[in-house]
Amino acid sequence: MPETSPPYEPESYAAAAAALLGLTLDPAWIAPVTANLRVLAAAAELVEAFPLADEIDAAPRFEA
């Protein structure tokens, strides 16, 4: 059975990360910071959901 992650709470994450980094978040910035974290989490879900074969390896160097 696949393991399920707890729901993502950007407000809790922002508070915990700020405390770990020794930062003080101005209350006026909490809404924009958490909005950005929600956008980043949505982008991460897209990347994580992209199917890759098990035999694919990461390229050591990208060249266009």
Image: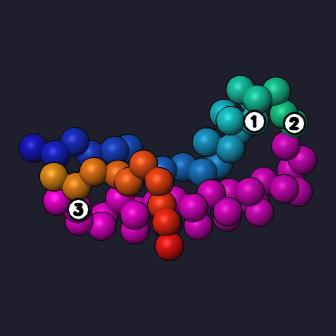
Amino acid type, residue under disc 1 in the picture: Ala
Magenta stretch encompasses residue 37:
yes
In the image, 18: left or right of 25?
left
Q: How far apart are labels 2 and 3 at the CA level?
A: 40 Å
Helix, strand or loop at disc 3?
loop
In front: 38, or 28?
Answer: 38
Q: Which residue in the protein does label 3 denote?
A: 52
* Disc 3/disc 1 C-alpha distance (Å): 34 Å
Write the residue at 61% across / 42% down: 13
First to last magenta residue range: 25-53
Asked whether residue 20 is drawn in magenta, I would say no
Q: Position of residue 28 (x, y in %)?
A: 88, 57
In this view of the protein, which residue sits in the foreground, 56 or 23? Answer: 56
Q: Which numbered disc, 3 or 1, marks the residue that appears first in the sequence?
A: 1
Check the image and report above or below for 16 versus 47: above
Residue matched to label 1:
18
Q: Amino acid at mark 3?
A: Leu
User: Quick check: marks 2 and 1 in contact, CB under 8 Å?
Assistant: yes
Q: Are marks 2 and 3 in contact (CB under 8 Å)?
A: no
x and y percentages locating residue 40 in the rendered image: 57, 61
Could you say which quadrant of the image residue 22 lies in?
top right
Q: Which residue is mark 2?
A: 24
